[in-house]
């Protein structure tokens, strides 16, 4: 049960997602669900629209800096929907944890500082592995004399592999829902209700559920 003051921080990773609201409502709902009950005060909500790439991502996030400053001033806790909404960079997460502000990730509300370091390290490793596989695939194709284009077969295969990597954490849940024999719309509603975001960071729809299941091994 939540107690005390909170400052909410929501982030989408592209301007397009920011304009369309993709991911924001799911994050906001997750925060609201976490705070529901108890005696709490949501001091303010900050929304960031940026990529967040690089270890010095804090300098590129004016809304996060403002949220941290307000939380420190109000002696409030920074609350986020998911740890990866802050960063998949371990150094950045460590810097944030040293900022003198308590924060809680709704998807791991009881995580210790050590746990948060480990989760950030795992997320960073996954991101690096995806980047390395992409780089290796493109290099191998170039060595074979393949001409790489925006709509080329090689890039299509690389993007397919990246999509599978993004689906990996929720593959079992998707397969389990499919096994229940419910509709794509029902699966989307269940995932959204559980606060599970799509690989693009937005809400689930029947269409992206269908595409996600089609990409998973039978």
Image (cartoon, grey):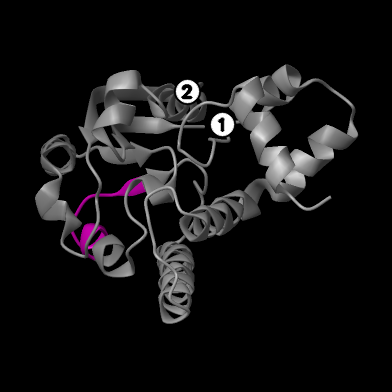
- Name of the residue lying farthest toward the bottom: 143
Q: Nearer the viewer, residue 64 or 20?
A: 20
Q: Position of residue 120 (x, y in %)?
A: 41, 63
Residue beneath the point at 15% across and 44% down: 61
Q: Which residues are magenta?
A: 95-103
Specify the quadrant of the image occupied by residue 8: top left
* Badge 2: residue crowd in 10 Å (few <14, some 14–19, many ≥20): some
Q: Position of residue 157 (x, y in %)?
A: 56, 57
Q: Nearer the viewer, residue 164 or 201?
A: 164
Q: Which residue is mark 2?
A: 29
Q: In the figure, 59 relative to 47: above or below?
A: below
Which secondary structure lies at badge 1? Answer: loop
Specify the quadrant of the image occupied by residue 81: top left
* Mark before the other along the chain sequence, 1 or 2: 2
Q: CA distance from mark 1 to mark 2?
A: 7 Å
Q: In the figure, 17 relative to 176: above or below?
A: above
Q: Which residue is mark 1?
A: 195
Residue beneath the point at 40% across and 26% down: 22
Which secondary structure lies at badge 2? Answer: helix
Query: In the image, 138: left or right of 167?
Result: left
């Amino acid at each position: 049960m939540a107690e005390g003051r909170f400052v909410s921080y929501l982030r989408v990773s592209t301007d397009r997602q920011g304009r369309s609201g993709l991911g924001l409502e799911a994050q906001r709902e997750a925060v609201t669900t976490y705070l529901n009950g108890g005696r709490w005060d949501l001091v303010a909500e900050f929304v960031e629209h940026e990529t967040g790439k690089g270890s010095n991502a804090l300098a590129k996030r004016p809304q996060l800096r403002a949220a941290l400053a307000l939380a420190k001033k109000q002696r409030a806790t920074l609350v986020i929907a998911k740890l990866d909404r802050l960063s998949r960079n371990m150094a950045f997460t460590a810097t944030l944890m040293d900022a003198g502000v308590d924060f809680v990730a709704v998807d791991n509300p009881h995580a210790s500082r050590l746990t948060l370091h480990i989760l950030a390290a795992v997320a960073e490793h996954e991101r690096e592995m995806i980047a390395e596989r992409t780089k290796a695939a493109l290099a191998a194709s170039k060595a074979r004399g393949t001409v790489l284009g925006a709509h080329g077969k090689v890039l299509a295969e690389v993007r397919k592999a990246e999509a599978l990597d993004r689906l990996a954490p929720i593959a079992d849940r998707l397969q389990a829902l499919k096994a229940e024999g419910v509709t794509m719309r029902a699966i989307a509603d269940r995932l959204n209700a559980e606060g599970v975001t799509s690989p693009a960071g937005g809400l689930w729809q029947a269409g992206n559920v269908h595409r996600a299941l089609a990409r998973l091994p039978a």
